[in-house]
Amino acid sequence: MASGTLTVDLDALVQNWRALGALAGTEAGAVVKADAYGLGVGPVSRALAKAGARSFFVATAEEAATLRRELGDGPTIYIFSGHMAGDTDMIGDLSLVPLLNSIDQLQRHLEALPGTPFGVQLDTGMNRLGMEPAEWAALRDLALAQGPSLIMSHLSSADEPQSAMNALQLRVFKDMTDGLDVPRSLAATGGTLLGPDYHFDLVRPGVGLYGGAPYKEGLPVAYLELPVVQVRDVEAGESVGYNMGYVARQPRRVATLSAGYADGLIRALSGKAKLYYGQRECALLGRVSMDLITVDITHLPEVPASLTLLGRQQGVDTLATAAGTIGYEILTSLGARYTRRYSGG
């Protein structure tokens, strides 16, 4: 079965990174976890490094090891999950920088890899990862004596600028770090957009690099074309797809396309998503199945070779809204069966 084509515009990606860095007026790192949000950590990270990115962030040591193979020596690679049991050899051999989240991780790192770089992650109210204020107060002198390369925290509600949680977390972060001679980072994409109070020494844009909200000025990066496998005429009263998910009220011309939930088109898109032939909108009919979707092309002047799911007509957040989810899930769900093409970079 023919696969769809996922095209990643590396020039747009780099432009988004530069624009967010310029907005912050400080160093811009790059979050490339989850295979660069599903778009390919190798090409994405190399393009960003070529453009000048020097600080990269991933979720796990395994992701960091993959990234180090792509980038070679030089760029700093931070690990959000910190120094987990079993990670010591990778961290030491590959010069990775764990963001330590607890007293256990601090002890593990100082005992196993004394004198090697580390950062500290603080919990300022998200209650997910990081040292809480009391824990940090107890450990601060010990940690600072070892010279951490970065102190960071993460905002829980930065995509909602009016949320009182943003100002609360900013105040807690400053209370925990003001006066320390250590680079600080609080803002990911949403925090970068909140203004200079949140920028500190380093911002960590993630989804905004890839054309996702809340960075509305971002250029689209991912383009997805899905090939038409077969076209049939459906009479009034006939159904399409599993469990009669769509029943035609009048004659329809229906195209079957090669993509499904195995390719990241989550089932919540069933009967809701739109695809495009140029600027002409085409409705997805019935259920998304594992490998196929069915689309109404009755109104098109000709049978298309493919239809566009992601592009300038429709970005990841519009598609996500149709599915009742967020752009992050759409991007990171993109499957491995697509033919991947990279432009620019």
Image (cartoon, rainbow, N blue to C red):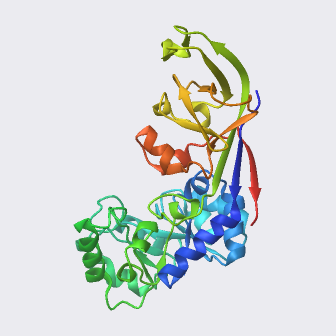
Residue 124 lies, in percent from the top left, at: 29, 69
Residue 303 lies, in percent from the top left, at: 74, 28
Residue 15 placement: quadrant: bottom right
> Is 334 in front, or is 122?
334
Residue ID at (49%, 14%): 249
> Is 322 in front, or is 197?
322
The quadrant of the rendering that contains the C terminus is bottom right
Residue ID at (51%, 23%): 287
Residue 37 placement: quadrant: bottom right
Would you place residue 144 above or below residue 50 in this image? Answer: below
The quadrant of the rendering that contains the N terminus is top right
Q: Tally the numbered discs.
A: 0
Residue 341 lies, in percent from the top left, at: 76, 51
Residue 324 placement: quadrant: top left
Can residue 78 be seen in this snapshot? Answer: yes
Can residue 69 be seen in this snapshot? Answer: no
Would you place residue 23 above or below residue 68 in this image? Answer: below
> Is 102 in front, or is 76?
76
Residue 194 lies, in percent from the top left, at: 37, 74
